[in-house]
């Protein structure tokens, strides 16, 4: 059996690394760890040759379009962020290094390509005590979406000002309380009565703020392309984030930890794999050698022993390291944060990215409107 390095496979396929990793994840190309360097992978030569032959020549437009929608090459040009060789970059800045010192407000300014961003501290709006923080942000964004001006036809300066107001709405709903001149990560820590968690929360907010054309960012761009308000685009992103395969994936890490508490890490992972076919807190298609965001967040606090054991056992059994969902759940466990803390952090931080994508899309002046390839009953003229 012959195996190829990533460089050799890419040369034969004539594709980008993201496409190679996507073909591995879909089972089209078998892969295994390189015994000489566990950070690298080897790819089955016959699978690569078969796929290269299949794609020789010019592919039909509809085939290219279908593949780009599913973990393929980027479908839209964007200057906001990118992932290169397992590193995440915000407008050319290494996100991990940026997270060593930056706040979410500074990250918003970077992603929006503006001088500064200041968020409302909650003096004018108060959280409704009867609802969860996530429910509250849905309510507040929906109210804004019903009355805010359309984004289309407005200047970058006007959009930046509007984005700041929308982001303040999100921050007030998710980090309630009146803390004048306090950055949002500290507001969250104080609101949860966990001031010692502030710096880890800050790092998590920065590292989850943006992640290229993920499903929620794409939803926000589609909405913005219609000319809808920035609040409507942010609401679209939030709605998508609520799905279990996106922002809700952290819950699987909590469930895994709970099972491991009674059954042991090995048995908990085995049971999850046998019942669900996947262990979501491990691995990421864009980080074949490990999610750098997870590593950076977990390095900022003392990881509880149960989560240390889970991470090590999962890497041994699955051949994958932990991802951002595991890191957020671990942080919540380490500091005793509320159960919805990972989703609150994710929603608050990712709103900055949704707004960046919405503004970038609006300024292109283009409508996102793919065509469908009809697969229904025959059409009778």
Image: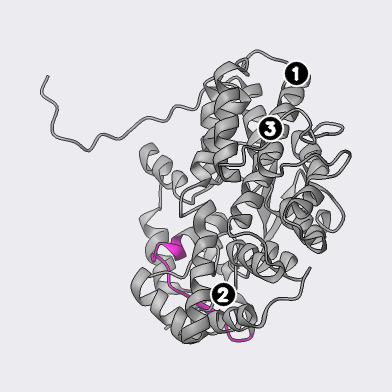
Question: In the image, is residue 69 above or below residue 195?
Answer: above
Q: Nearer the viewer, residue 263 or 2?
A: 263
Residue 197 screen position, x and y as percent: 78, 62
Which residue is the site of mark 3? 169
Question: In the image, is residue 101 above or below residue 296?
Answer: above
| Other-residue count near label 1 (Cα within 10 Å), few / some / many at <14 / 14–19 / ≥20 | few
- Which disc, if any, is residue 220? none
Q: Earlier in the sequence, mark 1 or mark 2?
A: 2
What is the magenta range?
23-36
Q: Is residue 134 left or right of residue 118?
A: left
User: Can residue 280 be seen here?
Assistant: yes
Which residue is the site of mark 1? 158
- Which type of secondary structure does the marked residue at label 1 adopt? helix
Q: Mark 1 and mark 3: span between their CA atoms?
A: 17 Å
Q: Mark 1 and mark 2: span between their CA atoms?
A: 47 Å
Question: In the image, is residue 86 above or below residue 129?
Answer: below
Q: Mark 3 and mark 2: span between their CA atoms?
A: 44 Å
The answer to whether mark 3 and mark 2 are in CB contact below 8 A is no
Residue 368 screen position, x and y as percent: 49, 27
Task: State the residue at coordinates (79%, 31%).
Answer: 123
Which residue is the site of mark 2? 41
Q: Earlier in the sequence, mark 3 or mark 2?
A: 2
Quadrant assignment, res 170: top right
Residue 372 screen position, x and y as percent: 33, 32
The quadrant of the rendering that contains the C terminus is top left
Q: Is residue 25 rendered magenta in the image?
A: yes
Residue furthest out toward the left: 380
The answer to whether mark 1 and mark 2 are in CB contact below 8 A is no
């Amino acid at each position: 059996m012959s195996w190829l390095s990533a460089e050799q496979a890419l040369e034969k396929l004539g594709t980008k690394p993201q496409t190679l990793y996507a073909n591995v994840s879909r089972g089209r190309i078998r892969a295994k760890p390189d015994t000489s360097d566990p950070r690298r992978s080897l790819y089955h030569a016959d699978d690569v040759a078969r796929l290269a032959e299949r794609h020789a020549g010019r592919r039909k437009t509809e085939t290219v379009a279908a593949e780009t929608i599913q973990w393929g090459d980027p479908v839209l040009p964007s200057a906001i962020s990118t992932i290169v060789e397992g590193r995440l970059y915000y407008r050319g800045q290494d996100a991990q290094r940026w997270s060593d010192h930056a706040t979410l407000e500074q990250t918003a300014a970077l992603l929006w390509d503006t001088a500064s961003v200041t968020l409302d501290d909650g003096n004018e709006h108060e959280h409704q005590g009867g609802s969860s923080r996530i429910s509250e942000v849905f309510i507040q964004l929906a109210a804004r979406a019903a009355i805010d001006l359309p984004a289309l036809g407005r200047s970058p300066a006007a959009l930046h000002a509007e984005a700041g107001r929308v982001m303040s709405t999100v921050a007030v709903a998710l980090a309630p309380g009146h803390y004048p001149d306090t950055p949002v990560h500290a507001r969250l820590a104080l609101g949860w009565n966990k001031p010692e968690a502030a710096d880890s929360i800050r790092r998590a907010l920065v590292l989850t703020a943006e992640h290229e054309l993920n499903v929620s960012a794409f939803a926000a761009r589609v909405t913005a392309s219609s000319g809808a308000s920035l609040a409507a685009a942010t609401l679209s992103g939030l709605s998508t984030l609520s799905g279990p395969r996106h922002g809700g994936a952290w819950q699987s890490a909590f469930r895994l930890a709970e099972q491991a508490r009674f059954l042991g890490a090995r048995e908990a992972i085995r049971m999850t794999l046998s019942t669900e076919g996947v262990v979501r807190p491990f691995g990421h298609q864009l980080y074949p050698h490990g999610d750098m965001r997870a590593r950076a967040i977990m390095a900022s606090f003392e990881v509880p022993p149960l989560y240390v054991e889970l991470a090590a056992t999962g890497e041994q059994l699955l051949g994958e390291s932990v991802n951002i969902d595991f890191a957020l759940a671990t942080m919540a466990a380490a500091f005793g944060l509320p159960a919805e803390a990972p989703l609150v952090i994710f929603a608050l931080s990712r709103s900055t990215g949704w707004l960046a994508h919405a503004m970038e899309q609006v300024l292109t002046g283009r409508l996102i409107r793919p065509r469908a390839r009809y697969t229904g009953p025959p059409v009778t003229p």
